[in-house]
């Protein structure tokens, strides 16, 4: 039996080679891997002894040879293949262990195109694909985490067709991801990320309980290793839980440490940034305690026992935070339906993806990710006669509106959301619905700041805001009726700011 080992990531390769030797395998290797195994005292054959040809062109060619690929690819179940291999002097290769040149790591540390090109692996993917194609006879290993599993299978009669098939699938995933990374990088470098093909690759983290509905299947996939840092402390996340967690966390991270966000069906129904997390929770809950029931709560900070006791007064389905202390977890111990997640750190984080996409029937639309910047409000143009010195509430309202489904209007007072209308076909309807709900809940909106993620097409939204006692408004501007909107603000003595930036979220 013969094993070919050629790896860029040398993690565990010496131990793996020793275990294979102990099982009677002859070890063949290349370049750096050969030197590592030789220096570890392992009897190893250098690849050129098999190919009868030296590595050449500074290592660009070393395994692209019939003695390598023939040994991997010929079918052991076909007598004519076996006979031809003997006639050509091709020895069978029964196990191929390869992981590829570190292309991703290279592009993260340098922009030198020549170095980047040299770190595009050719022989490695070819060997992996050959071994995967002939998986009925050959074991293909691409992940150091699988070394122990492979040795166990070889030792204990578990080297089944199904076992090799699973390794085959993983191998093709490995090379597909590698090629996708290269293609996406080249399109990013030369075509601003929008080439003729776009590849979206994710690594499975776990299956969700089900999809959006019980009759649908679902799973979470990650681009990098971000979700490996998500600690599932209690409960099993569903598809909808994850999308709600995403919506809540993005707002909480945007507002900063100390904020609390409550989301229901992807939309915020409570937001606050106060002097402490307990107060932030209490003020966030006041905005809409009815919708908050069964909602998803994001705490940008540490959930203590005191905060947990406050949250535990109502039913929330999901609580995600930077950190949930052991004492806080005990508070929720008897709540069977609550799900607890944290990142094990002082505050929440998001991955900050540079691109965004959405499935449509027959394909997907792809774009650079939206980014809400504080200077949009802090440097916004005052277009009204009066202004405000403190823009904190305007900034919070702007961030909430920008990260909520359009059409959206958000009202913030003293660091807390007091009314919101979202996902409406009419912006004035969004404004009216928000104010009507606040009135029903007995919330005083007078003195609030108001934000709209897109311009007001008519003055009617400003007139409605004036009736509620709004003191300041921020919106992008850009309507053909901007002058009418400005005139309305001046008539009512409302401070009006234009950011010049729109944040539709569809």
Image (cartoon, rainbow, N blue to C red):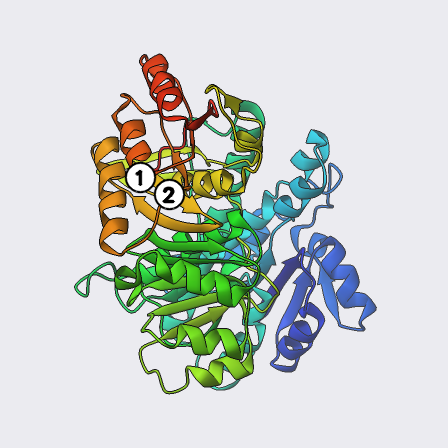
Residue found 28% across the figure and 36% down from its top: 363
Residue found 27% across the figure and 21% down from its top: 458
Residue 501 image offset from top left, x and y in percent: 46, 26
Q: Which of the 4 image quadrants contains residue 157?
A: bottom left
Can the viewer see residue 307 in this picture?
yes
Residue 136 image offset from top left, x and y in percent: 39, 65
Can the viewer see residue 136 in this picture?
no
**50 vs 448: above or below:** below
Foreground pick, 53 / 337: 337
**Which of the two discs, 2 and 1, labels the residue nearer the N terminus?**
2
Q: Quadrant of the C terminus?
A: top left
Q: Quadrant of the N terminus?
A: bottom right
Give the SS element for disc 2: loop
390 lies left or right of 336:
right
Q: Are marks 2 and 1 in contact (CB under 8 Å)?
A: yes
Rendered image: mark on residue 468: 1
Give the SS element for disc 1: helix
**480 vs 55: above or below:** above
Within 10 angstroms of label 1, few (less than 14), some, or many (20 or more) residues?
A: some
Residue 188 image offset from top left, x and y in percent: 54, 30
67 lies left or right of 74:
right
**448 vs 229: above or below:** above
Foreground pick, 410 / 236: 410
Q: CA distance from mark 2 to mark 1?
A: 6 Å
Within 10 angstroms of label 2, few (less than 14), some, or many (20 or more) residues?
A: some
Rendered image: mark on residue 446: 2
Foreground pick, 467 / 335: 467
Residue 400 image offset from top left, x and y in percent: 42, 44
């Amino acid at each position: 039996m013969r094993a070919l080992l050629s790896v860029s990531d040398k993690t565990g390769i010496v131990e793996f080679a020793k275990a294979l030797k102990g099982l009677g395998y002859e070890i063949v290797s290349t370049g750096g891997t050969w030197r590592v195994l030789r220096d570890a005292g392992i009897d190893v054959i250098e690849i050129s002894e098999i190919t009868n040809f030296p590595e050449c062109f500074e290592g660009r060619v070393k395994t692209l040879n019939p003695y390598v690929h023939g040994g991997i690819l010929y079918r052991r179940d076909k007598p004519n293949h076996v006979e031809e291999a003997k006639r050509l002097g091709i020895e069978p290769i029964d196990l191929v262990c390869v992981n590829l040149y570190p292309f991703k790591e290279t592009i993260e540390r340098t922009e030198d195109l020549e170095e980047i090109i040299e770190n595009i692996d050719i022989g490695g993917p070819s060997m992996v694909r050959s071994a995967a194609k002939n998986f009925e006879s050959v074991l293909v290993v691409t992940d150091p985490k699988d070394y122990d599993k492979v040795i166990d299978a070889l030792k204990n009669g578990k080297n089944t067709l199904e076992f090799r098939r699973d390794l085959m699938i993983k191998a093709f995933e490995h090379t597909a991801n590698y090629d996708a990374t290269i293609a996406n990088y080249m399109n990013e470098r030369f075509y601003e990320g929008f080439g003729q093909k776009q590849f979206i690759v994710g690594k499975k983290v776990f299956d969700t309980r089900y999809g959006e509905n019980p009759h649908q299947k679902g799973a979470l996939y990650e681009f990098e290793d971000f979700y490996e840092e998500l600690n599932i402390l209690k409960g099993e996340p569903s598809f909808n839980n994850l999308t709600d967690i995403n919506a809540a966390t993005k707002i909480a991270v945007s507002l900063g440490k100390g904020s609390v966000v409550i989301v229901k069906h992807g939309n915020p129904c409570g937001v606050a940034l106060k002097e402490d997390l307990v107060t932030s929770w209490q003020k966030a809950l006041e905005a809409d305690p009815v919708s908050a029931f069964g909602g998803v709560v994001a705490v940008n900070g540490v959930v203590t026992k005191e905060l947990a006791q406050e949250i535990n007064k109502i039913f929330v389905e999901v609580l995600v935070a930077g950190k949930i202390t052991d004492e806080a977890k005990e508070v929720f111990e008897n709540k069977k339906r609550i799900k607890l997640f944290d990142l094990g750190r002082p505050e929440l984080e998001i991955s900050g993806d540079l691109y965004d996409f959405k499935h449509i029937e027959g394909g997907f639309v792809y774009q650079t990710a939206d980014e809400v910047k504080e200077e949009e409000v802090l440097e916004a143009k005052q277009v009204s006669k009066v202004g405000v010195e403190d823009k904190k509430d305007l900034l919070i309202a702007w961030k909430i509106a920008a990260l909520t489904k359009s059409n959206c209007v958000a009202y913030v007072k003293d660091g807390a959301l007091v009314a919101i209308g979202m996902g409406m076909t009419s912006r004035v309807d969004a404004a009216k619905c928000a104010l009507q709900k606040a009135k029903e809940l007995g919330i005083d909106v007078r003195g609030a700041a108001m934000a709209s993620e897109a311009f007001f097409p008519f003055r009617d939204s400003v007139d409605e805001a004036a009736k509620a006692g709004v003191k300041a408004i921020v919106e992008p501007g850009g309507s053909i009726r901007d002058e009418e909107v400005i005139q309305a603000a001046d008539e009512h003595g409302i401070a009006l700011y234009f950011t010049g930036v729109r944040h539709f979220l569809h």
